[in-house]
């Protein structure tokens, strides 16, 4: 069965969107990734879209959305919930049915960078590279044969990578 992964951030405009797209690109049928925000901006940052498109990752259907969509009745069951920003990690999260494994993978917010176009592009490159590396490590775990405690430990370790 495919595993469902929810990436959370406050605004759901850059980091969590990129994580969703990267995982769906790399994981094929084994995982389905989603993203959401506690206070969604309602728009995906064009810099995030550009970064994904330049990396050959599909951008169709990406949108900024609330985590309420995923805690409502009828929402997909989540196996993993991963926060990618400090704000979302410190906010009270909804109670996720089924008690999914959780982790915090803090990534610097490229949308917060104020500077030259080159500095902003570098911030998006860095965030993308960090997320891509962590997702690659996550997908390499033997999910079907590893116990829940060991998996939770590995998720936390990946957040430090």
Image (tube, helix red, strand yellow):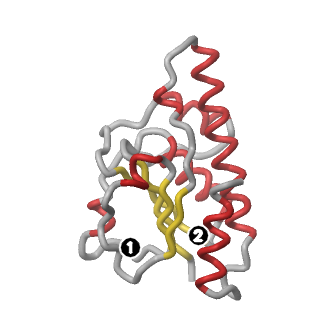
What residue is shown at x 68% (from left), y 49% (from top)? 132
Looking at the rendered image, the quarter that the N terminus falls into is bottom right
What residue is shown at x 61% (from left), y 51% (from top)? 22
Vertical placement of residue 7 versus 98, above or below: above
- Picture quadrant of residue 76: bottom left
What residue is shown at x 60% (from left), y 83% (from top)? 149
Question: Which label number is shown at residue 89?
Answer: none
Q: x%, y% of residue 159?
A: 63, 57
Q: x%, y% of residue 94?
A: 30, 67
Question: Which label number is shown at residue 76?
Answer: 1
- For this view, does 22 lie left or right of residue 74? right
Tell me if mark 2 has few (under 14), some (14-19) or many (20+) residues whose alpha carbon lies within 10 angstroms of its own.
some
Looking at the rendered image, the quarter that the C terminus falls into is bottom right
Task: Determine whether the residue tagged by mark 1 lies in a helix, strand or loop.
Answer: loop
Report how far apart the C-alphas of labels 2 and 1 lie in the structure: 12 Å
Task: Determine whether the residue tagged by mark 2 lies in a helix, strand or loop.
Answer: strand
Q: Nearer the viewer, residue 94 or 76?
A: 94
Q: Earlier in the sequence, mark 2 or mark 1?
A: 2
- Picture quadrant of residue 96: bottom left
Q: Which residue is mark 2?
A: 31
- For this view, does 135 lie left or right of residue 108? right
Q: x%, y% of residue 123?
A: 61, 28
What residue is shown at x 41% (from left), y 37% (from top)? 44
Tell me if mark 1 has few (under 14), some (14-19) or many (20+) residues whose alpha carbon lies within 10 angstroms of its own.
some
- For this view, does 119 lie left or right of residue 78? right
- Picture quadrant of residue 97: bottom left
| Residue that extends furthest to the top in the rendered view of this protein | 116
């Amino acid at each position: 069965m495919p595993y469902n992964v929810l990436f959370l951030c406050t605004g759901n405009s850059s980091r969590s969107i990129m994580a969703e797209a990267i995982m769906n690109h790399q994981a094929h049928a084994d995982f389905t990734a989603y993203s959401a925000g506690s206070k969604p901006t309602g728009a995906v940052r064009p810099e995030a879209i550009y970064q994904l498109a330049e990396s050959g990752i599909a951008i169709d259907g990406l949108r900024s959305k609330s985590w309420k969509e995923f805690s409502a009745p009828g929402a997909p069951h989540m196996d993993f919930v991963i926060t990618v920003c400090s704000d979302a990690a410190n906010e009270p999260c909804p109670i996720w049915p089924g008690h999914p494994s959780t982790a915090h993978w803090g990534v610097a917010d490229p949308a917060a960078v104020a500077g030259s176009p080159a500095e902003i592009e570098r911030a998006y490159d860095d965030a993308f590279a960090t997320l891509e590396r962590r997702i690659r490590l996550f997908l390499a775990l033997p999910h079907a044969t590893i116990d829940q405690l060991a998996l939770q430990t590995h998720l936390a370790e990946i957040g430090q990578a």
